[in-house]
Amino acid sequence: MNDRDERVRRYLRLRADVPIPHDLRWPSAADNRRPLTTLWSHVRWAGLAAAVVVAAVVVRMVVVSAPSEDGTRPGQTSPPATASASASSPVDAQFPTTVVGMPVVSVAQAVDLLERGDLDGRAVAIAGYFFESMPSCPPPMRYIGPLDDWCRFVAFADDVASATLCTYTDNSITCRPPSGTHLAPFFLSETSGALPSASDGKPTPLVLIGHAGDPRQWQCAADTQEGCRQAFVVDRIAWANGEEVPLTAPEPWDQTTFERLVPRLTMDQATAVLGLGDQVLAAAAFRAGDIPTVDPRWNLAGDEIMWIVRSIGADASADATRSVTVSLVDDATGNLVDAHDLALDAAFRPARLWTIATANGVECCAGDVFPFYRVRSEDGTVLHDGMVLGGAYGRDNATTYGPGVPLVLSPGTYSVTVWLASIDGGVIGPPTDECSTEVSLRELDDLMLETHFPAAGHACAFGQPSAPRLTR
Amino acid sequence: MAPRQADAASVAAIFEALVGPWVDEMYRAAAAIVGEDDARDVTQDAMVDAWRGFGKLRDPRLARPWLHAIVANRCRKHLRAKRSRPRLISVVVPEGAVDDQSAALSERDRLDRAFASLTVDQRVAVVLHYVVDLSVPQIATALSAPEGTVKSRIHSGVERLRAALESEDDR
């Protein structure tokens, strides 16, 4: 940790270093909206059945209140747009007609393309009005993938009214889910450009370049993958509030430690390898081990810095969409390591490997001991080396970790090693209680590998890989 | 069916037993997010929210992240409705040599300004991670947000604070 990080942490703790008032009032029945004990009589911790009922009610409430919560449609239209409606929706005159050499289309036209599958792995430039609001939601009680449209009100629409989701008064805000023809864009860690801050709930005019059919759909659960496939992922914010937005590389950072990464190359140097004529949509540097969070087809491990660059070829055609190439550039050498189409190959039929670990004797959820795992291919290449992600739950004497984002792997046999380690002050301790196994995966396998740590000082053991349990 | 008085008393006792250990921490988190002036109101409202929503707490071991999620929601409502910003400390730096105390105040001022420029969600994520010491998965569970989103909020929030120090150091 450097001096500035320490000063930031000291400042944050100083903000919280305040005297505690002694006159905070304990709530009482007078604060009830309805008789608390009536509600309480239906929900007891010891009553599993009651808890299940409440969970079902909560989930039902979310389905009703949150946008696109069915997991199969991440929010493009409601009701669905029709081709005729799309074709007749012009782009508002205030927007540019082209960006990065691409024609700019309306949201309705883009929705039409998306529903036909024409945006799968292909970029399109879209003009519209954008607004987002994060509603309060109960715990989802299920795995939420990176492109699952969970708990957010996001609208990118052709007109201001359709994108206006919140009404502000002097002392209150009222928000509603989006309706009508709209997209619900995802701005992810590789997206170029920053969203301008919205003022007083007014939608922002934007031109976004993005795509659907993102490979991270494979990091969603099988039953929400189709919805994730339709998610509109933004490569670049190209224009905002009347101004062109230049291509910028997001600030690179380590997704485990939050430390800033310092690439050797500039963005221009990293993209120079692509050659003349290519138009860069996004370029971002990552720790190699974090690359699968952008493109899970590249399973990398390690701390070296790599650049992911998305680009389109020079193309003067009037076609609204462009094929996209994704390139991996080594920051140390400036060399192109690998490249492939953003669009998934029809032959890409990977397996998902989920990981979950239960540690007996570890009190939940103190947060000082964590399971880690490493996956090697048959030739010994390390494909993953990191923590079992996905949260923790359990009891006084046992903690279960995961499942988090699955590994997306080609069919084959893999060596998996799991261990426990402490994390103290950001420093990972030595591995303990380690065990290893081999896992054979076939096309489209969807398997969870469960590890049990019986007690401190005893090696762990694996259960038989089984269908993933993604709800709690 | 009318609730029995004994049930109400039991619920109140359980509520106090579960929430009591975390009230100070809730208050400090609120102070860090919205500022000390408004922390009392936010915490009090959060306690009432917790009381009203107590039946939704399925597992008492999740009380801590659950309470912080409630505080976060209250902070979000408070900041957005009031459009409030943390009070800024005005510092007059004397001509010539800058002593240690004024330098520290200047740094605090810059960090206050940078913190005030964070979105509510960035503030919440940064405070829950660095002040309350919740892990990313715990925050993700508490806020019902994907871990990647939480990481991104923490990173971008801290990055803005670091940038404030960089500009200070470069002076």
Image: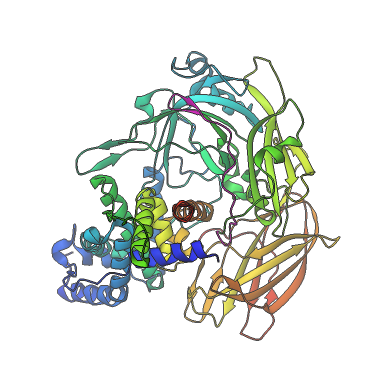
Instruction: Give coordinates of residue A456: x percent, y percent.
Output: 61, 85
Q: Nearer the viewer, residue A137 or A301?
A: A301
In the image, is A132 to the left or to the right of A338? left
**Magenta run includes residue A393:** no
Q: To which quarter of the image does residue A277 belong? A: top right
With respect to residue B155, does A250 lie above or below? above
Instruction: Give coordinates of residue A142: x percent, y percent.
Output: 50, 56
Quadrant, the N terminus of chain A: bottom right
Instruction: Give coordinates of residue A443: x percent, y percent.
Output: 76, 49
Q: Nearer the viewer, residue A62 or A390?
A: A390
Q: Which colour assignment does the render follow?
A: rainbow
Specify the segment rendered in magenta.
A239-258
Q: What residue appears at the point 37 percent right and 36 percent down from the top-left corner?
A: A198
Q: To which quarter of the image does residue A99 belong? A: top right
The residue at the far right in this view is A379
In the image, is A445 to the left or to the right of A189? right
Q: Main secondary structure of the magenta part?
A: loop
The residue at the far front in this view is B96
Could you tell me if residue A169 is visible in this image? Answer: yes
Could you tell me if residue A79 is visible in this image? Answer: no
